[in-house]
Image: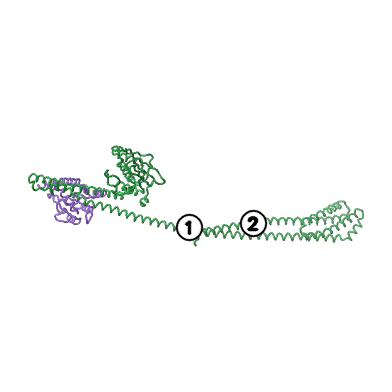
Amino acid sequence: MTISDRLFQRLVFVFMIAGFTLLATAGVVSVWQLNRSQYFTQWVDHTYRVQGRLLELRYLVERAETARRGFILRPEPRFYDAWRRAAAAIPITVDRIAETTVDNTDQAKRIAELRPLIARQRAAWIQTMGLVKAGRPQTAIRMFRTDDSTDVTRHIRRVLEAMVAEEARLLARRSEEQSAGSGLLYAVLGIAGVLVIIVGITSVVIIRSYTRDLARSRTALRALNENLEDAVKERTTDLQRANDEIQRFAYIVSHDLRSPLVNVMGFTSELASLVPPLTEFVERADKEAPAIVTAEARLAITEDLPEAIGFIRSSTEKMDRLINAILRLSREGRRTISVQKVDMAALLEEIRNSMQHALTEKGVDLLIEAPIPSIVSDRLALEQIFSNLIENAVKYLKPGTPGIVKVRGRAEGLRLIYEVEDNGRGIDPRDHERIFDLFRRSGTQDVPGEGIGLAHVRALAYRLGGVIDCDAALDRGAKFRLSMPATFSVNQEAAS
Amino acid sequence: MTNQQPVNIIMIEDDEGHARLIEKNIRRAGITNDIQHFTDGTSALDYLFNAPEGPAKNGPALVLLDLNLPDMSGTDILARIKAEGPLKRTPVVVLTTTDDKIEIQRCYDLGCNVYITKPVNYESFAQAIRQLGLFLSVIQVPDLEGDG
């Protein structure tokens, strides 16, 4: 199963909302149920209170009746007092009951039924008690026998029992309702719980499947990356091979070119060695038989031959230098780079020392502006680069101006910028690219050189992952700017 | 050094011009020994090891060897000569245009006695060959004495 990011986010969101909604619902239901159960508890309490009062009333009625009967049989004041207290408490209790059951019409009806009964009973009680007190117990007894106070008492008892039963019924109903409420609560909580669990499980399943997808795509990505690395490696190998091929080609070509050159030079020398005997021969002929020496022959031997030999020689020598330059470049290209930390200030001082003679002779000031950042790269190549640049600066001075050569360096991000600046004759801006080409030179050709130095410098800079450019104008000095990676890495070599 | 025969110079050089220049300069240095010239490695090796008048079977020799040969590398010939066999003490002078340090090192490792770069500057070349001639005259002295 594959889940897109958007879908995943939506699903997780929906499930979180669902989960929280369920929890909130469960909370609301719980609070509601708590309120309800408090309400029920109040009512249960109420019911018990009403029942208690009903029982109290019944007790009072019974007690008043019993005290009256006792007083009729034996007119003692304690019976009378007991009756009076009970009889006095009865209306208050009835009022209280009426108060507490005012909301129940059935009970109110019963109380309304009760009140005249109690009043009647009370009237009968007062009458009998009055008779006994008046010393006519016989009349009271007769009256007691004939009146319906027993029936009234029973009636009161029935009404009260009915009221108690009614309260009990109410209590039962409320308990039932409460337990029904609890049942609902449990049901809601149960359903919410189950739903939360379902949401949870589904979320976990989705997240797991998504995570699995992620892991799978990460593995795929890694595989792809490795492939990419392989591809890069392959390409680098191809480039390396092509580069090696060119280097080898340059090497073989330059090497094999030297072989015929050895012959040209050798036999030119052989020719040159023929000039003295021939000259001698001409001189002798001049003396002994001047007639046989033509002007042509003399010119050929004394002038044309040495001149031709001279030209052949200088040309072959130049050709040899050029071939050597190519050889040197190809050899430099094949050299293994050894990376190390190079203290540039010390390296430049070394160059200054090695060039001290030329500097003094030409009166050039070489200023190495501290601080010069150190670099991690190939020491030999750096030495060659800076030697060439400084040598060039010293070589191409502006006539009449004392030479000043400044070397400085600074860090720019991960790269180091080095500058070699002079106040020499400068370079025509049209030649800024050309001077880096092999065998190409610029300006007045009054200083010996083959046009190799800067080509070499650029090849070395490229090899170290660097770039070199030139900022100069005629007669206003030249500034060569070398930008190098602060730390040489093999990848940079491959990239260059 | 009881051998009475003169030292034969065996020159293995594919470039006729170089061969001629080398020979001229050797003669100019006063060396008159026989010079056998081969322009390829195969025939040179055949002569060195198998010819009845060759150095393996008969007499001392000195080898002048060019490293760039059409049919094989000069270092292979050098290795063959300096390997165990009748020629391992034969002096070998490597004469080539290569001034590659690694190449020179390799030749000395294989047992080359002298290494001479053929420079384009003819004077220095002639100088080197003449010095080589002196070197040759030194090693052949006992033989000359033997002849006399």
- The picture quadrant where one finds residue A183 is bottom right
- The amino acid beneath tag 1 is Leu
Q: Is A415 on the left or on the right of B20, as rendered?
A: right
Q: Which x, y percent locates residue A290?
A: 8, 46
Report the chain shown in green: A
Mark pair 2, 1: CA separation: 39 Å
At mark 2, the secondary structure is helix
Q: Nearer the viewer, residue A200 or A149?
A: A200
Q: Mark 1 points at which residue?
A: A214
Instruction: Say which residue appears at 32% left-offset and 55% top-offset.
Output: A242
Q: Which chain is mark 1 on?
A: A
- The amino acid beneath tag 2 is Val
Q: Which chain is mark 2 on?
A: A
Q: Furthest-left residue in view?
A: A288
Q: Which x, y percent locates residue A448?
A: 26, 44
Q: Is A200 on the left or on the right of A300, as rendered?
A: right
Q: Nearer the viewer, residue A131 or A14?
A: A14
Instruction: Say which residue appears at 65% left-offset and 55% top-offset.
Output: A31
Instruction: Say which residue appears at 59% left-offset and 56% top-offset.
Output: A20
Q: Which x, y percent locates residue A337?
A: 33, 48
Q: Is A383 on the left or on the right of A112, as rendered?
A: left
Report the chain shown in purple: B
Image vertical order of residue A197 relative to residue A463, above or below: below
Q: Residue A28 carries which label?
A: 2
At mark 1, the secondary structure is helix
Q: Residue B10 carries which label?
A: none
Disc 1 residue crowd, few under 14, some 14–19, many 20+, Cα 10 Å: some
Image vertical order of residue A238 relative to residue A343, above or below: below
